[in-house]
Amino acid sequence: MLELKNIDKYYNIGTINEMCLFNNFNLTVGDGEFVSVVGSNGSGKTSMLNLICGSSHVDGGKILMNGKDITFKKEFQRYRDIGRVYQDPAMGTCPDMTILENMAIADNKSKSYGLRLGINRSRVDFYRDQLKSLNLGLEDKLHVKVGALSGGQRQAMALLMATMTDIKFLILDEHTAALDPKTADLIMELTDEVVREKHLTTVMVTHNLRYAVEYGNRLIMMHKGKTVIDKAGEDKEKIVVNDILDVFNEISIECGN
Ligand SMILES: Nc1ncnc2c1ncn2[C@@H]1O[C@H](COP(=O)(O)OP(=O)(O)OP(=O)(O)O)[C@@H](O)[C@H]1O
Ligand SMILES: [Mg+2]
């Protein structure tokens, strides 16, 4: 379970640009829940993910992971339990290293001597099997540099690398946004498979309303640091894309657009 409790978050404190993004923000994500998060630009989606992962820190409140207070835990400590995939395929992989080297790094991420670039030969078959599951032929390109792959191939690898260790939480920030529609569909299907297979508690930010509706068992819409839609289970299944568009329109009118 993931809990954000009474979160306050300010940016540019003490300057003329000071802004309060979250004021007493609360969110609880249950075990195995797959939450799709939508919302307009600047509504606080990435900020929320950064707080969960520790790439940014709260100004008030607590973050609990499986009941443990991780508010003051460092980012790298949190990544033992969290896999994260970003919008930019370049963020989740090392372009100057081969597919094999990338897999070895991901495999060692939770070990304290992880950056020693030793490839454990006995793991190569395991890496090959993992890559095979992507159905992109990457298992035959182990010695190709990742920088030579297409964005979609890299994102598939980033997803694989983020989820190959024994993580419990998956954090996705518009991870299909840079891909063509067909490749985006493929990455979404792979995502859904891995979430189910590993029973991952997942928070997926997306601007693709079709994905938000089709995938996951809970849907949240954010606006100005607050949740304005939060539907789970059967209520979520009833939501159609137009329902979300209607709320976007209402908000836009409220904001004078
Ligand atoms: N590091 C930062 N310093 C100052 N302000 C920031 C910082 N990060 C985010 N903000 C501000 O916080 C607000 C929320 O930004 P955030 O990136 O969380 O939005 P988002 O919902 O992810 O938007 P998008 O859909 O465009 O990715 C914005 O007003 C943004 O300008
Ligand atoms: Mg964002």
Image (cartoon, helix red, strand yellow):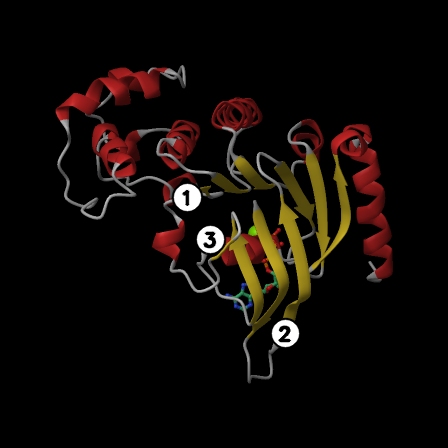
CB atoms of marks 3 and 2 within 8 Å = no
Residue 210 on image: x %, y %: 70, 30
Q: Amino acid at mark 1?
A: Asp
Q: Amino acid at mark 3?
A: Cys
Side of 153 where 3 appears, left or right: right
The label number, if any, that marks residue 124 in the structure image? none
Measured in 3D between alpha carbons, the distance from the residue under mark 1 to the one under mark 3, in whole angstroms, is: 10 Å
Residue 147 on image: x %, y %: 29, 35
Tell me the residue that label 3 is attached to: 53
Q: Look at 49% across and 23% down and name the residue there.
A: 197
Tell me the residue that label 1 is attached to: 81
Helix, strand or loop at label 2? It is: strand
Report whether the residue tagged 3 is closer than 8 Å to ligand 1.
Answer: no
Quadrant into which the C terminus falls:
bottom right
- Which of pointers 1 and 2 indicates the residue nearer the eye? 1
Helix, strand or loop at label 1? It is: loop
The label number, if any, that marks residue 19 in the structure image? 2
Q: Look at 44% across and 59% down and name the residue there.
A: 55
Q: Earlier in the sequence, mark 1 or mark 2?
A: 2
Report whether the residue tagged 2 is closer than 8 Å to ligand 1.
Answer: yes
CB atoms of marks 1 and 3 within 8 Å = no
Side of 127 where 230 appears, left or right: right
